[in-house]
Amino acid sequence: MFSNKEYIKFIESSKEKGLDIVGASVIQTVGSTYAKPGNMILVNSIGEFTGVLGSKFLHNKLLDLAKETFKTKQNQYFESIPEDESSGHGSSKYFLQGFFFENNYGALGTALENIGKTLIRSIKDDKFEILNERSETKLEDDKFYQEIQAAYSLLIFGSGAHVASLISMANLMAWKTTVIDIQIKEEYVFLADELIELKNLEDILTMDLSSYNASVILSHSPKTDDTYLKALINSDLQYIGLMGNKKNMKRKIEQFKLENDKRFFAPVGFDIGGNTHQSIALSICSQIEARKNGKI
């Protein structure tokens, strides 16, 4: 539900301003659609928004319905059905609900405090409950189930100039970005959400890495790479990427017995034929996204 960090930033910003929020969620689709169940946009009471669910017409329709929700404090239900059946576009159902500052944003605020569980909302009224386990996103009878996910989190080892493009690309993907290094060069990595400077290299071996989903080692130092890799192998991270040439990467795989570890990608990134720092960042983020979505 909050796997896109922009949602969390938007809620925090709106709360600082004392603004109400309307959430428009896709609750069901049939056929080919731009957005899928669980996707949402958030709109606050001064018209700011985050998220995109489809065409200009649809977006404006949802913004208008959000204004009506602010005015009436009544939930809205909307179904988008293409006029031209031969267009190839499917139909979508949307649920718009108000979350008000005076109530600490109701179900939305409660969900933020229950990451890893499931929010179940009635589409007929404001009733909701928290299920203490993960569930697939679905509409069942008049109840909409959404897994409450934390923002997808990328841990980047290294802070040289070559890291800046990867941070920018990961931020575009709305992932939480954390840079860790011995001597952090902040002028290159200031766009990261968090910076962790190690006093000693070996400190990484005792750090709790359970809050991160993916990692990329870009330190360009064999000794440093090995220490970081040891820490990551013993973690639960879903993706471990290491930059280097194929010969050295083959040696790393043998050294650390990673032949059957499907989390490990070295050399990191898809081969997309580019060699600029921007294309390298794109190749890495594409591979992470593919792994995240179970495509590799």
Image: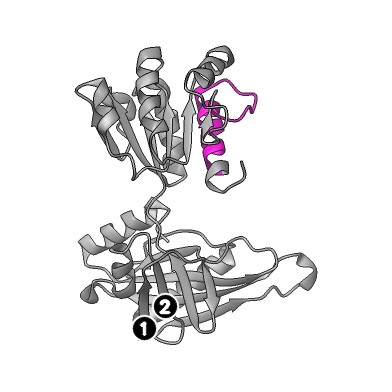
Which residue in the structure is indicated by mark 2?
Answer: 121
Question: Relative to 246, does residue 110 appear above or below in the rendering?
Answer: below
Quarter containing the N terminus: bottom left
Tell me where residue 236 sits by quadrant: top left
Q: Earlier in the sequence, mark 2 or mark 1?
A: 2
Instruction: In this rendered view, identify the residue nearer to me: 87 or 154.
Output: 154
Instruction: In this rendered view, identify the residue nearer to me: 224 or 142.
Output: 224
Mark 1 belongs to which amino acid?
Lys
Disc 2, SS: strand
Quarter containing the C terminus: top right
Instruction: In this rendered view, identify the residue nearer to me: 253 or 199.
Output: 253
User: Can residue 283 be found in the magenta stretch?
Assistant: yes
Identified at 54% across, 84% down, the residue is 141
User: Can residue 8 be found in the magenta stretch?
Assistant: no
Tell me where residue 161 sits by quadrant: top left
Question: Where in the figure is residue 82, as x and y percent of width and height?
Answer: 69, 73
Mark 2 belongs to which amino acid?
Arg
Question: Any mark on residue 127, and which?
Answer: 1
Colour mode of the rendering: one colour
Question: Where in the figure is residue 242, as x and y percent of width and height?
Answer: 48, 25
Question: Where in the figure is residue 140, as x and y percent of width and height?
Answer: 54, 79
Identified at 21% across, 21% down, the residue is 200
